[in-house]
Amino acid sequence: MKIAAAIDAYLDYIAGVRALSLNTVDAYRRDLNAFQVFASESQITDLGALSVTLLTAFLQAEAVRGLSRQSLTRRGVALRRWLQYCCQAMWLDEDFSQSVELPKAARPLPKTMSVHDVEAMFRCVRIQLSEKAKHAERDYALLMVLYASGLRVSELIRLELDDLFLERGFVRVLGKGDKERVVPLGEKAHDALSAYLQVREGNEHKTKPCSRHVFLSNRGRGLTRQRCFQIVQGIARDAGLKLKVSPHVMRHAFATHLLQNGADLRSLQMMLGHADLSTTEIYTHISNTRLAQIVNTRHPLSR
């Protein structure tokens, strides 16, 4: 069986039988075709001539060529699954796919913001408040809740009035997997929400229908995910920030700044709604990076 024919058969299988998306099939095609070219350069065109040595040499060559670790991992996975398919089709006598070592994909550090950047955004909205700009109270409260509680945007737009316990200083959040958790707000977020709710109540008789969601659109319906992104990005732009800010970046800023100011990982995990502490631990890397920057710029030996 020729390598090229086995690749074509596998691509037909994942497209037709497994019904994978066009983008996924195209990604597998690029990865497997790259391997086919590499094998042909070594005068290998038959499946029977494949070996762990050849597959490993291919991945090493791709690494030398400058392919990212994530792309290398994806190519290795494509090779493994293709080899498994070839064994199931009885074109290969031995399945040595698991012998192909995959490079561990580096976990990307989340994008975050400095305290200075966050303060610039809040100053911008306070100016809008003083000028009585439309939706300024809502946008200020929305930004406050994001930064004070670290909610995901999906959790923010699902917040309903019954989820607010302002007199006790917390909100009830429905997170991933419909898991419920309680998140403290803080005094400033409490005040911003209270002020917005007064405006919201005064507008209820003007706009129908009116949703039970906390944050409303012009039409009295709950905000969409896209609209939340637009609001946050618009505030960042008006504040003169060059970085691309999203609700998720605000969540990362919440976590990073808390950790930098002495919060423990377990408490942070509970507030963020992470099922696994290892997910929360990524913020320690950000803090360590920040510490390294401080040492490099402030230590006497670096001057």
Image: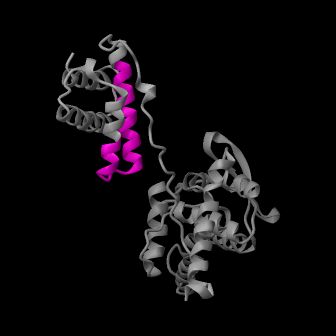
Give the color scheme: rainbow, by chain, secondary structure or one colour: one colour
* Observer-nearest of 3 and 257: 3
Residue 63 included in the magenta stretch of the image: yes
Q: Quadrant of residue 187?
A: bottom right
Q: Is residue 46 above or below residue 120?
A: above
Task: Give the number of callouts.
Answer: 0
Image location of residue 175, percent across then percent down: 64, 47
Q: Position of residue 261 (x, y in %)?
A: 72, 72
Give the overall secondary structure of the magenta segment: helix
Asked if residue 4 is positioned above or below residue 194 in the image, the reply reads above
Is-magenta flag for residue 47? no
Range of magenta residues:
60-85
Task: Please state, as top left, top right, bottom left or bottom right, where the C terminus lies in the image.
Answer: bottom right
Q: Residue at x 67, y 67 (%)?
A: 148
Work out whether residue 207 can be spotted. no
Tell me: 121 left or right of 179: left
Tell me the quarter of the picture where residue 159 sits: bottom right
Residue ID at (71%, 58%): 268
